[in-house]
Image (cartoon, grey):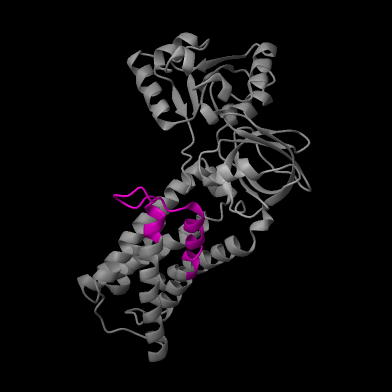
Amino acid sequence: MVWSLMALAGLLAVPSVSHTNAGTTISLMASSMAFTGMAIALFMATRPPFVERLFGGLDRIYRTHRRVGITVLILILVHYFVTPDFKGLSLTSGLNSLAAEAGEYAFYGFVVLLTLSIVKIIPKTKIEIPYHYWRLTHRFIGLLFIMVAFHQTFIKRPYDGTAMLATYLNIFAMIGTISYIYTQLFPWLRTRTYEVFDVVRHDGATVISARPKGRPLKARPGQFGFFRVNKPGLREPHPFTIAGLDADGVVRFAIKPLGDFTKALRDSIAVGDSLKLEGGYGHFNHRRGGKKQIWLAGGIGVTPFLAMAKSLTGDEGQDIHMVYCVRDRREAIGLDTLEAQAEKLSNFTFNLHDSNTAGRLDAAKLAAASTVDPAGADLWFCGPPLLRIAIEKGLKELGKKPRRVEFEQFEFR
């Protein structure tokens, strides 16, 4: 749908500008497609629930969002370097000149900001662009879009305002502008306020428990939410999987200190702190799966499985075996919950793979330890991508290829 909407903008440009010349046609096709792509990207940034269902998860929306950004960058470069050359219509010379300047400045801004969005690490260096700088600069993309909307509305052009292309672009100008205003002014509409009442610092993760101060989150086991703390340095929202959500609204997060934000969180989070949470997002939920399932958690990837395991009642009609792989047993979290559920339920079995004593987990060890035959079963995975790739390849070589492999492409900036 996304690529079709962008392509349609290019197709609508053909009858509107083809009477000019090939260069102008190519340039204005590229600009029309780029403008539509910008509007769609801004709309996706509002995280609409119905669109998440269409994509199969917010993680996939963001992957498409990134691809659209790369495509837009290429298209605006085409529009800039393939200069339109035509005799066109303009409302007034003053507006035309102003629109031309707005378009030029927006072009430079887009090239810089889109490049920052695409490139996480400066080439040939170890310098990584910090998340909070990226997020701050990324907010200006909406302002640049408004400048481009002004540019495409008032710049001299080879078609009038009644052309189908003009109507199409005006619709996307409205969609993009409203989406940007919404993301900047009304984020509180979907956030919930929580208060921290317990913090436990394990070797492998910081486990934070909080209770709602008003309406609780609406989330299912396996989903993630956006998390921020009302403290200096911790106010930027970051996505984390929900490790537990009780009937009374109490929520738990298990967060491994891997980066600047998570390390600062571990050092400064305290009982009584106020949290702003948004969620739940994602479609990582075993109820969508088959009757035979293997859950494989690598390190902190155990978090969605903790929530899913706790929600099991034994009457799901699914046989589930879970393997929790850690480098050292001391890093494991939630063992009490997993072991208790395995003891209580006939359809759930569990074992902990301690790589320090049992060696690296591979497909043969997984198949030998599992009470569920991997061949034809669902493999639900959360953890390091290299572990998933190695297990998938190994199971295929053993002739025990799973029916399907479910995982989230959790790669947010």
Q: Is residue 298 placed above or below 215 in the rendered structure?
A: above
Q: Quadrant of residue 181?
A: bottom right
The image shows residue 23 at horizontal and vertical percentages of 22, 71
Residue 408 colored in magenta in the image: no
Residue interval drawn in magenta: 114-143
In the image, 323 versus 380, the foreground residue is: 323
Residue 92 visible (yes or no)? no
Question: Is residue 124 part of the magenta span, yes or no?
Answer: yes
Which residue sits furthest left?
22
Q: Position of residue 365 (x, y in %)?
A: 43, 12
Quadrant assignment, res 366: top left
Q: How many marks?
A: 0
> Relative to residue 402, is residue 48 depicted above or below?
below
Residue at the image point whose x is 35% and y is 82% from the top = 156
Q: Is residue 72 visible?
A: yes
Of residue 378 and residue 116, the one placed in the foreground of this image is 116
What residue is drawn where x is 41% and y is 87%? Answer: 91
**Residue 281 vertical placement versus 284 (above, below):** below
Between 153 and 325, the one nearer to me in the picture: 325
Q: Residue furthest front?
A: 267
Taking depth in this image into account, of 91 and 354 the one nearest to the observer is 354
Residue at image position (47%, 53%) is: 130
Outermost residue toward the bottom? 93
Give residue 338's quadrant in the image.
top right
